[in-house]
Image: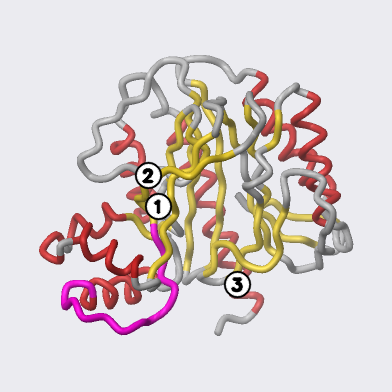
Amino acid sequence: MQDDDTYIKNIRSAGNILKIVKEESKKLVISGYKVIDLVEFIEKKVIEMGGLPAFPCNVSINSIAAHYTPNLHTDITLKSGDYVKVDIGCHIEGCIADTAYTVKVDENDDDLIKATQEALNNAIAAVEPGVKTNYIGKIIEDTIKDFHYNPIKELSGHGLKPYILHSGVTIPNYNSNVGSKLKEGDTIAIEPFASTKAGKLKTSEEVYIFKYLQDRPLRDPNSKKLLSIIKQNYKTLPFAERWLEKDYSNLKINFSLRNLIRSNVIYPYNVLLDSEGGLVSQAENSLIVTSSGCEVYT
């Protein structure tokens, strides 16, 4: 168990890694660049700098809102005019930093991108001990609507704890009826999403990201072996199918993962889409609630 000082030191170090990786990766969000090359660059850079990916790098394009990461042989390339949301996580000994940005390929930031950037900045400015999370959500919703877009209410910001990406407090992207008060020392990620449509989601059958839930009896030897690898390598953090494909292809990865889902051993993060095909932007930073406000560490 880490003491508070070690935890803060580690999340700051993870955040400093993401600050560099974020700026370097933006240069690669250009037409003709392969999505698989983008996520591989980001994840390798995180490791080279002394961290580990806290989750698979998400690259969600246009009406894809969240949870898309490519498999090894995915051949998708970025096109001019695409809205590309890049969501990056880094952890050091389980201490997590989480950040995201949106780029319109080959073009300057437009109002859809500015809506989530400004919503994030306004929300961060309101953070202090005692502020209620639904008040932060109201700020996010009002800012996005001022740009004549809609927040995606089914996605939210979240608390961060060691080895738990979504823990404790939820930071809504709208003025919800109930909220909890933030406390000094809380570590949270604020994560506005904006849509050109109504901001409703639908769940795709596609799934490329998973996380460990619990042990259950398993008969299949490949599934048993894969579960052992998942627990050892990723603990309770999300992982990608392609990470396993690289080193453990002999374990019939796709079949074994589906077997673990059916057994309720792992959780699938299905790809989420705007239900009306709306274009979606995202912005995110991680922060520590301090006595006088907050410290953004990504």
Say which residue label 3 marks.
7
Q: Nearer the viewer, residue 240 or 130?
A: 240
Would you place residue 127 above or below residue 106 in this image? below
Q: Are the residues flagged by discs 1 and 3 in contact, CB closer than 8 Å? A: no
User: Mark 1: which amino acid?
Assistant: Pro
Indicate the quadrant where residue 40 lies. Answer: top left
Kindly report which numbered mark, 3 or 2, lies closer to the viewer in this rendering.
Answer: 2
Residue projecting furthest to the left: 250
Q: Amino acid at mark 3?
A: Tyr
Q: Is residue 145 shown left or right of residue 17?
A: right
Distance between mark 1 and mark 3 Cα atoms:
22 Å
| Alpha carbon separation for disc pair 3 and 2 | 28 Å
- Residue 97 lies left or right of residue 183; in this view the side is left
Q: Secondary structure at mark 3?
A: helix
* Mark before the other along the chain sequence, 1 or 3: 3
Q: Which residues are magenta?
A: 210-223
Q: Cα distance, mark 2 to mark 1?
A: 7 Å
